[in-house]
């Protein structure tokens, strides 16, 4: 897995953080927040997701990956730092 800060590393050094998606605006309806928290695409193909480098730099980043063969197409550092190592940052 290519870490934007550390370079290529063993995939076991990372923790999957879930699909990258836009956080609803404050005051959005409950159904919008429910969909944000629980609904996932989970489709075979290209996925943009959050990853945490738990055994390296201890930073969150985004990776675009093909879930059919686990090929990482791109990895980038987030533009906004996360609040906490256990919470992926919102968009």
Image (cartoon, rainbow, N blue to C red):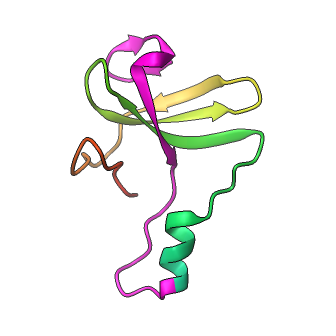
Q: Position of residue 84 (x, y in %)?
A: 22, 47
Residue at point 25% right, 41% down?
85
Q: Is 29 displayed left or right of 47 in the figure? A: left
Q: Position of residue 77 (x, y in %)?
A: 36, 34
Q: Nearer the viewer, residue 65 or 31?
A: 31
Residue 69 included in the magenta stretch of the image: no
Q: Is 39 displayed left or right of 80 in the figure? A: right
Q: Is 76 displayed left or right of 19 in the figure? A: left
Total number of numbered labels? 0
Residue at point 39% right, 78% down?
25
Q: Is residue 26 above or below residue 1?
A: below
Residue 22 included in the magenta stretch of the image: yes
Q: Nearer the viewer, residue 56 or 62?
A: 56
Q: Is residue 23 above or below residue 81?
A: below
Residue at point 42% right, 25% down?
14
Instruction: Quadrant for the C terminus, please.
Output: bottom left
Q: Position of residue 71 (x, y in %)?
A: 66, 22
Which region shows up in magenta? 1-30
Q: Is residue 86 above or below residue 32?
A: above
Q: Quadrant of residue 73?
A: top right
Q: Position of residue 89 (x, y in %)?
A: 33, 52
Q: Is residue 35 above or below residue 16?
A: below
Q: Residue furthest left?
A: 83
Residue at point 52% right, 68% down?
36
Q: Nearer the viewer, residue 56 or 71?
A: 56
């Amino acid at each position: 897995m290519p870490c934007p800060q550390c370079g290529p590393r063993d995939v076991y050094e990372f923790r999957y953080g879930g699909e990258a998606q836009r956080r609803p605006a404050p005051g959005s309806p409950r159904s919008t927040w429910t969909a944000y928290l629980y609904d996932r695409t989970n489709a075979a193909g290209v996925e943009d997701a959050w990853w945490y480098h738990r055994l390296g730099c201890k930073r969150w980043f985004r990776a675009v990956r093909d879930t059919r063969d686990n090929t990482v197409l791109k990895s980038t550092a987030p533009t906004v730092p996360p609040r906490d190592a256990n919470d992926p940052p919102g968009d």
